[in-house]
Amino acid sequence: MIRSYLQSHKQLDAPSVPWVHARCRSRVSEPVIRKATVRRTFTLAACLLAGLMGACSHADSQAAKVSADSASATYQSHVEPKAPDSWSPKAAAAYMDQREAWWMQWKGAARDHQTFCVSCHTAVPYALSRPVLRKALNEEAPSVNERALLDNVTKRVRLWKEMGPFYTDEDYGVHKAAESRGTEAVLNALVLASYDAQSGTLSDNTRAAFDNMWALQQTAGEKKGAWPWLRFHLEPWEGLDSEYYGAALAAVAVGTAPGDYRATPEIQNNLTLLREYLGHDYKEQSLVNRVYLLWASTKLPGLLDAEQQKGIVTEVLAKQRADGGWSLPTIARKWRGWGPRALAQLWLRSDWTLYDGESDGYATGLVTFVLQRSGLPSANVSLQHGLSWLMLNQSAKEGLWPAYSLNERRNPASEIGRFMSDAATAYAVLALSENSGAQQRAAALAVDRPNK
């Protein structure tokens, strides 16, 4: 997962505050850190509260504006606008292939038995999106990197009892082995099920992946129905509420699996637990988690009724920006109370930099993809504006869509800085390909019924 790069502190692009990365505390004494943290936290809280009342100084506002403008300038230099009615599947595929090849060879992703970590930001989005480009690229079989990813996942499934977890308790802290197992089990099932869906046949390997997944589902406690999930204070995939994201992906995996796998008698009790977990207090989840729930509800019946789906769609549309896109902070941030830390996290990353406020490819790609899957008409004006934003914001030079970390401000040209763009590009491809498919179906229907 995205925690891989933290194996070496020198790979970080910026330092984190003490409450996020505890192991960094060894560099500074505890009393000094506590005093500095308390002082900065309460100073920040006072400013934020004053800002809510319109009392923050003009100088502070100007400084924040300069910071945001600087970040915007950095990313805009990275993005070359395209014509509003076009995008390049070839460039997107080239970018994703290059990134997946790098990830598979990166020492930070290496795991035992000559395998590599299956990441939420690069590997999984790649597996979900790369196949949809085959028709546009006239490809007849999975790419070399797809095959390597599938072989890696299959190997870890087959040797499940022999494989070590992605992260161990000894190296990363209590519960990390269990969290790693739960996370990997869900992601393995999702990747393999998505490929089986293309052939229409559930393979023995995928069935084994589901068996591993169900064996780790929690059957008691507050998280009953979910899976242990990696928590590294890294949003949006490894945060404090990411079990919900993981459970939604498990539902997508089950609903995607061919051969009516969801009707298998042996898993009905598991599905009941999963539905109950996802349905309980879902309105209290961050909006980005509910977007994943909306996607899951289109794959697995019984998660949401029509009115609940409509409610999420309405809330998502209300977050659309004037340029047609969506911004990840506005759908990922969640009000957690009036404490200094909770207030700070509404506006600031853990390195005390302001969130990027502009639209980004990950939020816009994910939202427009899921809105289409939920049945929003292709002629919907908001949807079309979102798709237009995606067409305009693919980098003509690199084929990617820009996106920004919620955790630290990173150099967008660095390997680590591209993690968010990896996911953004994958979901942009899913959204635009879904739209292309809808347009083709509409055109075919018009040909079949020219007088109606």
Image (spheres, rainbow, N blue to C red):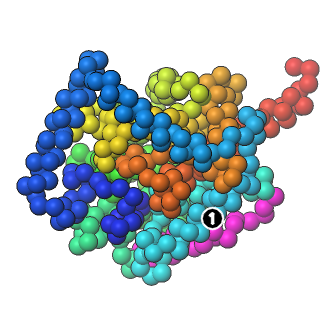
Q: Quadrant of residue 52?
A: top left
Picture quarter with the N terminus: bottom left
- On whether residue 294 falls in the magenta region, the answer is no
Q: For the residue labelled by badge 1, is the local secondary structure a helix, a strand or a loop?
A: helix
Q: Nearer the viewer, residue 401 or 157?
A: 401
Position of residue 298 measured from the top left corner of the image (x, y, whole percent): 55, 38
Residue 272, position as x, y percentages in the image: 38, 44
The residue at 53%/35% (across/down) is 359
- Name the residue at 37% across, 50% down: 408
Q: 10 Å neighbourhood of mark 1: few (<14), some, or many (≥20)? A: few
Nearest the camera: 110 or 222? 110
Residue 305 is situated, as x and y percent measured from the top left of the image, at 48, 28
> What range of the chain is rendered magenta?
138-160
The answer to whether residue 338 is seen in the rendering is no
- 56 vs 424, left or right, is left
Quadrant of the rendered structure where residue 21 is? bottom left
Residue name at image x 54 percent, y 41 percent? 73
Q: Out of 157 and 57, give the one closest to the viewer.
A: 57
Assign the C terminus to one quadrant of the image: top right
In the displayed structure image, the side of residue 350 where residue 114 appears, left or right: right
Residue at the farthest front position = 59
Determine the main secondary structure of the stretch shown in magenta.
helix
